Image: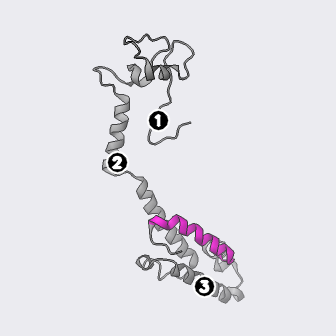
Amino acid sequence: MEIKGIDNFSLWYRFMKIALLGQNKLGMVDGRWKKEKFQEKYWYQWERCNAIVLSWLMNVVALTLISGIAYATNAHTMWIDLQERFDKILMMKLVPSVNQAYAMLMSEESQTKCSRISHSKENCYKIVGYPADYKFKKKGGAGAYNAVAEYGSTSSNYSALPELSPYSQPS
């Protein structure tokens, strides 16, 4: 499997870890088998293993991405470089654009404001829920609002619906 960019990095990363583990070479990239950990008489063998892993990594990276890693002399360094490069890109994707941030703000604002003048989230039954003993003025107008009022209400207190935000998971 060839890494082509951000779209398949996670899958490629998992694939490579499994392949390297199967070839008993995962320690070359994860830092467990650094050259200095071995006796000097084994350094030549370490260098050969390092060259093999470097070639495997270079052969599964798209040509458009190879220039950033082509001159690495250590498989562990190359592995870390690839991880850092794509982690930064993935983290940048988590930051919303100005348009996305504005849309989130407007969505949250619409959930905290009522269309009636002087109403806010704290005193609007449509947002915080109707009291259990609320008498609806329209015939049959209770509809969906009764379901809101009944959620978790055991007295004449307002029902407490969990507040959701785009940044939190419901509990």
Q: Secondary structure at mark 1?
A: loop
Figure check: 155 above or below 42? above
Give 149 or 98, whichever is nearer the viewer: 149
Q: Which residue is mark 1?
A: 164
Q: Secondary structure at mark 3?
A: helix
Render colour scheme? one colour
Q: Earlier in the sequence, mark 2 or mark 3?
A: 3
Callout 2 touching callout 1 (CB < 8 Å)? no
The alpha-carbon separation of the residues under discs 2 and 1 comes to 18 Å
Task: Give the residue type that dot 1 points to.
Answer: Leu
Figure check: 94 above or below 128? below
Give 127 or 142, whichever is nearer the viewer: 142
Residue 62 appears in the picture as rendered: yes
- Residue 100 numbered tag: 2
- Residue 52 numbered tag: 3
- Residue at 49% across, 27% down: 161
Q: Which residues are magenta?
A: 6-26
Task: Give the residue type that dot 2 points to.
Answer: Gln
- Residue at 34% across, 52% down: 97
Residue 32 screen position, x and y as percent: 66, 72
**Is residue 19 inside the magenta stretch?**
yes
Residue 116 screen position, x and y as percent: 29, 21
Figure check: 100 above or below 69? above
The alpha-carbon separation of the residues under discs 3 and 1 comes to 51 Å
Residue 33 screen position, x and y as percent: 66, 76
Residue 26 appears in the picture as rendered: no
Crowding near the residue tagged with mark 3, few <14, some 14–19, many ≥20 C-alpha atoms within 10 Å = some
